[in-house]
Image (spheres, rainbow, N blue to C red):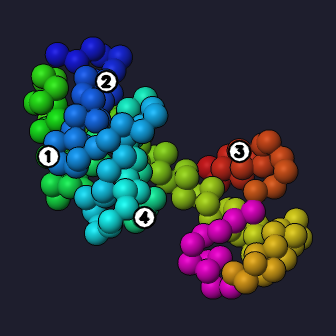
Amino acid sequence: MVNRSRTIIDEVKDRLDIVDIVGSSVELRRSGRNYTGLCPFHQEKTPSFIVNPERGSYKCFGCGKGGDVVSFLMESEKLDFKDALKQLAERAGVQYEEPKPPAPEEESAHRRLLEVNKLAARYYNHLLLTSADGASARAYLEGRGIERAAWETWTLGYAPNSWDATLKFLQGRN
């Protein structure tokens, strides 16, 4: 069983060597601290695919794909996260347990946090669109060619230079 202080993901990453996992489908050659090979995700003749065992990561400088041992298996085997993690856990000898649904009180607290986050985002967006303090932010966005419609679509905002402005706004909503 996985130590409570560590997640299954961390345990799997610690127990598996990314060089072994990647090396099972890519011919790798040692190059200093790293390993190089031809990228399995696109056609190339010159190796631009790097595996860094110290970081437990890979990166292709040709196509830009990169990540850890889990994302490599997901990409190379066309698996979703859960199935990739299950396979790697089995290979690492880590017991995989299905995530349990959150307790009702946890779910309620999570929903409340999401609602507070949405309120804060709308507050910042309102300040960007209408406040005098938001004028410099509006000028910046306009100077970058970001249209006003995008500000509203993506709920871009302006946070005032005050440590308690958001708190006061949220408290005033109750």
Task: State whether residue 17 appears in this view.
Answer: yes
Q: Nearer the viewer, mark 2 or mark 1?
A: 2
Q: Nearer the viewer, residue 16 or 34?
A: 34
Where does the magenta region start and end? 147-158
Q: Residues within 10 Å of mark 1 (few under 14, many from 20)?
A: some
Q: Which residue is mark 3?
A: 167
Q: Nearer the viewer, mark 2 or mark 4?
A: 4
Q: Amino acid at mark 4?
A: Gly
Query: Where does the image place residue 77, in percent across and percent down from the top left?
Result: 15, 54
Instruction: Indicate the amino acid at tag 2.
Output: Asp
Q: Secondary structure at mark 4?
A: loop
Q: Is residue 171 magenta?
A: no
Amino acid type shown at disc 3: Leu
Q: Which element is circle 2 on?
A: helix
Residue 130 makes an appearance in the image: no
The local crowd at label 3, few if under 14, some if 14 to 19, many if 20 or more residues have their Cα within 10 Å, is: few
**Distance CA(mark 3)–CA(mark 1):** 42 Å
Q: Which residue is at 57% across, 72% downward?
A: 154
In terms of image quadrants, where is residue 69? top left
40 left or right, relative to 64: left
Q: Classify mark 4: residues with Cα within 10 Å, few (<14), some (14-19) or many (20+).
A: some
Question: Which residue lies under the disc numbered 1?
Answer: 83
Badge 2 is on which residue? 14
